[in-house]
Image: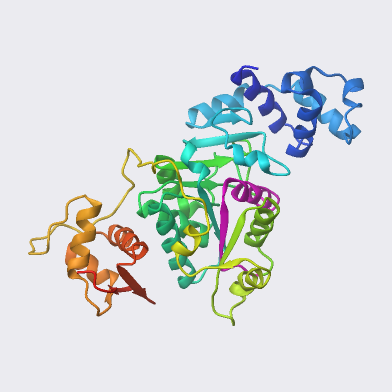
Amino acid sequence: MKSIEQVENLVRFALTSGVGSITVNRLLRHFGNSSAILSAGEKELLEVKGLRKPQIAAVLEAAETNPRLELEMAEEAGVKIIAYDDPSFPQQLLECNDPPYILYVKGELQPEDAAAVGIVGTRAASRYGCEQAERFGAGLSVSGYTVVSGLARGIDTFAHRGALSARGRTIGVIGCGLNHVYPPENRDLYTEIPLSGAIISEFTMDTSPGKDTFPRRNRIIAGLSLGVLVIEAPERSGALITSRQAMEMGREVFALPGRVDQENNSGSHKLIREGATLVCQPSDIIDELPKPEIKHHTPQTPVRAVSAPAEKTNKPSVKNDNRNKEEIILNILTKEPQHIDEISSKLNLSVGEVAATLMILEIKRQVGQETGKYFFLLGDTL
């Protein structure tokens, strides 16, 4: 079937209430393709095992639905709609028990995104949790992994920011249509992520965020990832739902320990007791997962970075070269810990640039970090 026809047919289902992905997948298994479903009459639909009369009525309604306005809306917003049989559709998603049959994509999905790690956690994250989410996001990115998260407040936000600071790929899976920016304070991420990854959703363009949409997107985060890292999750949280779904799919589950007297860490600690891998640094995850085989993608358009105003100074000049930055940072570091702001000031670089370079040096085990973003030389580096 032609891709355009397939997308149009599947969008009809997405626009019709009462026809969820479980029903559509059941129909596809029975009829073989979307055109055959939409051509079927009530008698033929009654032959589908597990299909009830309200669902049959909804399928018949979908056949009469016009997808034109939805398709035009997506095109105007720069959103591509891909079907489950499109070559760019992530094949690992089809391993879900209830896979999405279409995806709305802002940005580009790449083959190297098959080597992805999900990072999830509470929206009410502590400063420590946010710092660690950013640290792991950057560390996984510089090692070639795509970082997948849900673009929510808290842990998700800083996981995406970490990947962007390291000039890596990141995918945001949202629980609403792409016409909505939610939460509104992440508007900058909605602009930046498609430049070096993608924002994706299974929901139609105008679908509002709701309590039932976010749990559904969690299975997509798990399905896209080789493993899922949980940072700060209470025992009743969406992050734990994602980790459970990852386990069911045979994915690795990792958890970062935290303070034992904080509720935000109770779910993470429970996962560790149940067998999740305890991690303290990105290399703990990297050592457990298949190594990316495809060279990491570099975004064509630089991610926004705010540098300190230029001033007359004798500070060392740093060219836009990662190796050069590593050498100069190593030259100013000592065994005595220095705060990242001090390092940034000495080099006249943004904190984001310094953080990304320090993360590379941490992974190479040339630099160590103390609590509070204090960095120092390890071993006989110089």
Look at the image and give the residue range highlighted in magenta: 210-234
Left or right of residue 292, residue 310 in this image: left
Report if residue 251 lies within the magenta region.
Answer: no
Instruction: Name the one closer to the observer, 1 or 128.
Output: 1
Of residue 147 and residue 263, the one placed in the foreground of this image is 147
Q: Where residue 375 appears, x then y in whole percent?
A: 30, 73
* Magenta span contains residue 226: yes
Point 18% across, 69% down: residue: 332
Is residue 367 placed above or below 250 in the rendered structure? below
Residue 357 drawn above or below residue 91: below
> Taking 352 as reference, is 52 left or right?
right
Identify the residue at horizontal 17%, vertical 51% (top origin): 319
* Quadrant of the drawing holding the C terminus: bottom left
Count numbered badges in the picture: 0
Task: Describe the colour scheme in one phrase.
Answer: rainbow
Residue at 45% from the left image edge and 54% from the top image edge = 160
Residue 341 visible in the picture: yes
Drawn side of residue 61 relative to residue 161, left or right: right
Q: Residue at x 68, y 54 (%)?
A: 245
Q: Nearer the viewer, residue 112 or 3?
A: 112
Q: Position of residue 99 (x, y in %)?
A: 69, 40
Q: Position of residue 187 (x, y in %)?
A: 45, 49
Q: Is residue 54 left or right of residue 339?
A: right
**Could you say which is closer to the camera, residue 288 or residue 28?**
288
* Residue 15 visible in the picture: no
- Above or below 369: residue 120: above
Q: Quadrant of the N terminus?
A: top right
Q: Position of residue 197 (x, y in %)?
A: 45, 42
